[in-house]
Image (tube, rainbow, N blue to C red):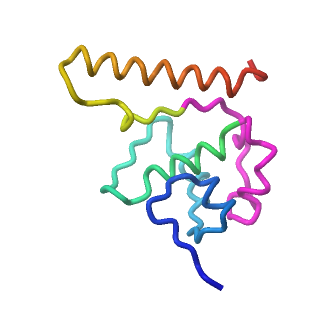
Amino acid sequence: MTIKFPYGLADFQSIREDNYFYVDRTDRIARMEQAGKQLLFLRPRRFGKSLWLSVLENYYDLARADRFEELFGDLKIGRNPTPKRNSYFVLRLNFSEVDPNGDTDAITASLHQHINSCISAFDFYYRSYL
């Protein structure tokens, strides 16, 4: 059997669906919930920050409640979920998609375009819940 490593992949759902190797750190979700409301993730580049945010997105997203067992069932948090699982609307912003080139007005316009695009996607994704 060949082990597939998810080098460069930061999409938790794809990693789980496509049977990539995944080191289960989901037990940290419960500890994170107890840590407080403002969290700051300080890690060097390529240390899994985006993947961890994808894990949290899949765990807390209320629209993915029907996939909880498939994605988390055999993981630590799946065996002992917190009461907050699948109970939030998740608005995902990826500032790496904002074009940093140009003057302040161009960068501001790019930022506004990205935020508006994310809000439109949010509205479409959660329309049946709103």
Between 61 and 2, the one lying in front of the other is 2
Residue at the (43%, 36%) spot, across then down? 94
Q: Position of residue 49 (x, y in %)?
A: 43, 52
- 10 relative to 19, above or below: above
Residue 71 image offset from top left, x and y in percent: 72, 56
> Percent x, y for residue 78?
73, 58
Q: Quadrant of residue 101?
A: top left
User: Which residue is at 74% across, 66% downward?
Assistant: 74
Taking 37 as reference, is 27 left or right?
right
Residue toward you, 48 or 17? 17
Which residue is found at the position 50% from the left and 40% from the top? Answer: 36
Residue lying at the far top of the rendered structure: 105
At x 36% / y 59%, what residue is drawn? 46
Q: In this view, does 121 lie above or below 83?
A: above
Horizontal relation, residue 119 to residue 114: left or right: right
Segment colored magenta? 62-91
Residue 77 quadrant: bottom right
Looking at the picture, tell me which residue is in the foreground, 50 or 100.
100
Please state, as top left, top right, bottom left or bottom right, where the C terminus lies in the image: top right
| As drawn, 116 above or below 36 | above
Q: Quadrant of residue 109?
A: top left
As for residue 16 lying within the magenta part, the answer is: no
The image shows residue 94, relative to residue 25, as above or below, that is: above
